[in-house]
Amino acid sequence: MAANKVRLYICTGCGIGEALDAAALGAIAAQEYGAQVVTHPHLCGPEGGTLIREEREREGCQRLAIAACSGRVNAEVFTLDQTLVERINLREQVAWCHEPATEETQALATDQVRMGLVKLQKSDFPEPAPAVSQERVLVVGGGIAGLTAALEVANAGREVTLLEREPVLGGWLANFAYISPSTPPYREPQVPPLAEKVRAVQAHPRVQVLLGAEIEKAAGEPGAFAVTYKQNGNSAELGAAAIVLATGWEPYDATKLGHLGYGVSPNVITGVELEAELKNGGARLVNGRAPESVVFVQCAGSRDENHLPYCSSVCCQASLKQALLLRQQFPQANVFILHKDIRTPGQYEEFYKRVQEDPQIFFLRGEVASVAPDGGNLLVSATDTQLGRSVAVQADLVVLATGIVPRAAATLNLDYRQGPDVPSQHYCFADSNFICWPYETQRTGIFAAGCVREPQSVAGCIEDAAGAGLRAAQAVTLIKEGAALHPRVGDLYYPTFFLQRCTQCKRCTEECPFGALDEDAKGTPQLNANRCRRCGVCMGACPERLVSFKNYSIDIITSMIKAIEVPEDEDIQRILVLACENDAYPALDLAGARHSKYSAAVRTISLRCLGSTNVVFIADAVSRGIDGVLLLGCKYGDDYQCHFIKGSELASKRMDNVRETLGRLRVEPERVRLEQVTMDDWDRLPRLLDDFAAELADLGPNPYKGF
Amino acid sequence: MAEPVEVLKPDTKFIADVIKLGGQSAKKCFQCGTCTVTCNVSYAQTHDESFARRLMLWTAWGLKDKALTDPAIWACYQCQDCSANCPRGAKPGDVIGALRALAIERYARPRFLARWFRDPVYLPLILAIPAVIILGLLLAFNVQVPSGPVVYKHFISEIYVEIAGVIVAGLAILATAYGMLRFTLETRLPQPGAVDGPGALAADLPAERELPATMVSTLSDVATHADFRACQTETTRTWGHLITMYGFPLLLIATALSFLYGLVGIDQQSRSLLDPMKIAGNLGGLLAFVGVCLLIYKRFQAKPAKWGVGTYYDWLLLWLIFANVFLGFATQFTRLAGGVNLAYWLYVAHLTVVFATFVYLPYGKLAHLYYRLAALAALRQGSKTGPASVFIVVIAGVAAVLAAAAVLVAVLAAVAWVAQALPMGLLALPESGISLNLYLPVASVSIPFGCWSPLASV
Ligand code: HEM
Ligand code: SF4
Ligand code: SF4
Ligand code: SF4
Ligand code: SF4
């Protein structure tokens, strides 16, 4: 295996040299893996960096192992062209978190070096990226979000197609005379920034606008989407590299709000209906006279388990604005705002304060129980109010502040095995990781902006659209290079499927969180490489173990596990930790950086995602006599933090299989456990690991030890 | 759940009135309840779950009757602990102050007199009425500024001043009595744990609470300013108030004595500065002066962001009291210094301000002294007997003071008569002798009324 010649650099700086016997490590590496070993006192310094590069030139060795600090730091020093670099973490996870110069710490370092070298020897360079055909961005939806996204993408230098269902651009905003203020001092309603956006889009040389068009089907993958749309009765096709979904919202169906008087009287209207009246010359007169009393019913159908369980976050500010406009139109009128709470996120609180100043706008918290005819006008009754009792207010006009329903489903009609919709996690809004990458949907290359993603104000939509648009523009570039998008930005490896052995069990196609895998007629998976985010969930799922990356595979991981030396002495524990690289592994690094100590029996392998855990990893570990296996992954469930959405959840589901396997091996199921951790669990992790070690000690040694 | 539904109708005029009286921040409230937990008269001591907050809501909604008949508005010391802590920049202390002003107006008859007190436009009128009465007297009797040493009764006979005082003070007392009656009838009584109304002192409301216990607790609280002193934000003001408040009974005693001296024909002006009347008058005046100066100083110091510098309504009372005492002392000192013309005219000005302060008692801010007592009693007692009994006690107290003064004068008179009978002539008899002359019957019927005209407090 001459080509797999490896060179190992051991750094003795940062306390590594004091904690470990570097010479002994080097001797084992040379002896067992034929590595050329270089020891250096300060590898990340300018001298060390130069040394590595000079030797790379001179020796031509393409596989370098750096046994030093964590791979999460100093990446710029240790990244070399045309070179496979494996970082062996002797600092954060060995020298800094275990007793220095002890036998167990040295054993841990030795195993870390072994695992790193095995991985390095078995890894290979990525294959060239598949060529892509498209560079255009498709923006779906011509409302304020879509217009903004189109402009952002075009200004970033990419060609854009803006597709709008209606015959005109503008979306809902075209119906709005004013919006709540989004600039200091946030006191008076503002004219929406629509006209200038529409003009800019229409005049932009890189934006093509398709009006009255609806998408029939979107097939393909990022870099090569083939979108069929219908316009004026004709079907046509366009190509796109990335898509921005800005299809917006519609108001909740007020006909379902009979208890709030909708349909009972013509003078019970929705906020959106009032908006149109205000735009077209002002609110209605009631019985030919200016209304003396107008009641706004907030949360009409919102925050209500029977209707929309969520808060739409904008109806409050919309009503505040409308209340002011009504007071301007009818100076004598009293305006009542009956609410569950007034929710005015961010600076809209200033606007709320402004509206409160009007002596004839009245706020009361309570549950509106009914809106009923009362003589010539209406009576709005509320229970459980802040006045401590049930009260009623007479009204000439009642406005129901209905919530926002996203238009996410059935808009793109994706030709994906997993279905036509952009998936949702909550309430039909297009899901995205709301903290780390808010615009990436669960479909790679498709970015959501505006109310289709989350109910939000005009200002929010504009900000969203800028984010999503720039993400889309960036995606076009990355995809062209064959590089992954978030979270493994720039990763050039793809999974490969050794399909000769495929049994068409469909686990991979079902479990891929991003719908990257379609199926042929027989059910054999077909990868759409650019939809893939490189999580390895398919690798973990496949019972035939035929999915692999050139630098991450079943073989590589199991070989690493086998490289761990399990002492015959029954009193010496060995614990395998499979840690997700996104949160768990960094948390372990942080624990080390804070010099928290924990059991030196722990051997950690970093996984792309806990979802890439294959049951065979655990079976191998246990049958080799390792006392216990701990899986550390991100939080899963409704408010998931998993960077691949479902990875850690899928891993937890596979634990059933694991238990079965353990049963077959006659090993206690307690030896394997999954824990959900976040980055800030660094202070909890050492205790968690020690507790696990103590529990394993209570169970006694793994019966396979010494076999 | 057959809870009666109340149809709310905001009284927008009421809202405008509150705003004019310094309560504009009522509309800022967003009902968080911070004021409730910071206020020492509400939550911390009494577990009134909604005090201050509910008044903000009622005010913002223009629910006038609810707001003005809540006795808890009189439990508020306007200490501004709430205003200093309101996250919304509302000033419940100032809003409740405005509510008190409107409550005083609500009970006052004729009501227009009360309205005069909240608009500076009427200040000339307020002062003109007593001034006209006094100058009218001067004209009617063709009074000349006398020459020689300053002797006020040569200038304007005490009898006229006293008759006028008795009449207008009597009217004021009638208006006060009427206001108290209305207050007693309309006040909404606390219900333990009530959210829809006063529940102040609710936890402190044992069912068997006896009236005397209520009275003792109320009066001792006021006498020591125990609750007032719980304030965290503005502490000096409490002492200013305490001192001012104690100045007044002394001035009342001096007035009563002077009145009785007049009745029995003792020449007041020639009494030495060690005479009981003089001691009470000068000591009371001094206390009131020091107190009111402290209060004025604190108002000037107030930070508008924290609590109000005060409205015209607040300032009017402070300056009236200041003018009263200041002019009183000025008159006394110019007389002693022999400044003839000046002394007489200062005397007229003093009389005018005194009238303006006390004749208008039921119409201006000073009315708080009896509404507060009554409301505190109502909150403690939890029944209408509380306020009613306060009224009785106040009247009885005043009568007692007068009786004591009368006894004192009788003793003095007796001593004087005896002395006159003695050959040594130890004491000079008052010029006119002991003349229980013709106005005595009128005046003695009006004794309780007369106390309100501390004419000779100098
Ligand atoms: C002869 C009796 C009284 C006099 C001369 C008197 C005088 C005054 C004066 C001048 C102020 C205005 C303070 C300022 O503007 O800072 C005031 C306020 C106040 N007084 Fe009195 N007072 C008397 C009796 C009472 C009584 C019996 C109470 C009962 C507790 C009371 C409670 C208060 C309170 C709480 C305030 C502050 C609230 C406000 O300014 O409206 N006072 N008083
Ligand atoms: S924004 Fe206001 S009205 Fe709309 S759902 Fe939220 S709380 Fe209700
Ligand atoms: S690596 Fe992840 S995203 Fe890619 S195909 Fe496999 S499961 Fe899907
Ligand atoms: S603290 Fe301020 S906002 Fe909160 S209830 Fe009191 S007055 Fe209202
Ligand atoms: S001013 Fe003081 S006494 Fe009055 S409500 Fe506020 S905190 Fe309470």
Image (tube, rainbow, N blue to C red):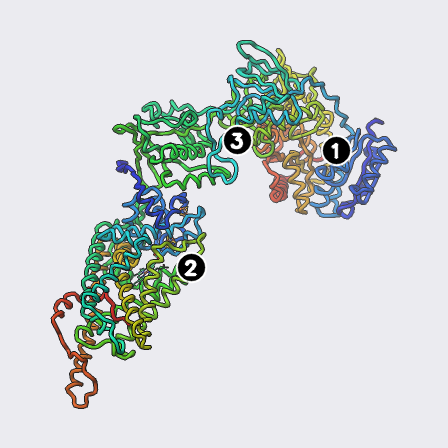
Q: Choose top left, top right, bottom left or bottom right for residue B152.
A: bottom left
- What residue is pinned by disc 2? B300
| Quarter of image, ligand 5 | bottom left
- What residue is pinned by disc 3? A638
Q: Choose top left, top right, bottom left or bottom right for residue A274.
A: top left
Callout count? 3
Kindly report which numbered mark, 2 or 3, lies closer to the viewer in this rendering. Answer: 2
Kindly report which numbered mark, 1 or 3, lies closer to the viewer in this rendering. Answer: 3
A10 displayed left or right of A415: right
Marked residue nearer the N-terminal end (1 or 3): 1
- What residue is pinned by disc 1? A563
* Chain that bears disc 1: A
> Do marks 1 and 2 both belong to one polypeptide chain?
no
Residue A125, given in percent of the width and then of the height, sits at 77, 26
Tell me the quarter of the image containing the C terminus of chain A: top right
Residue A689, given in percent of the width and then of the height, sits at 63, 41
Q: Amino acid at mark 3?
A: Asp
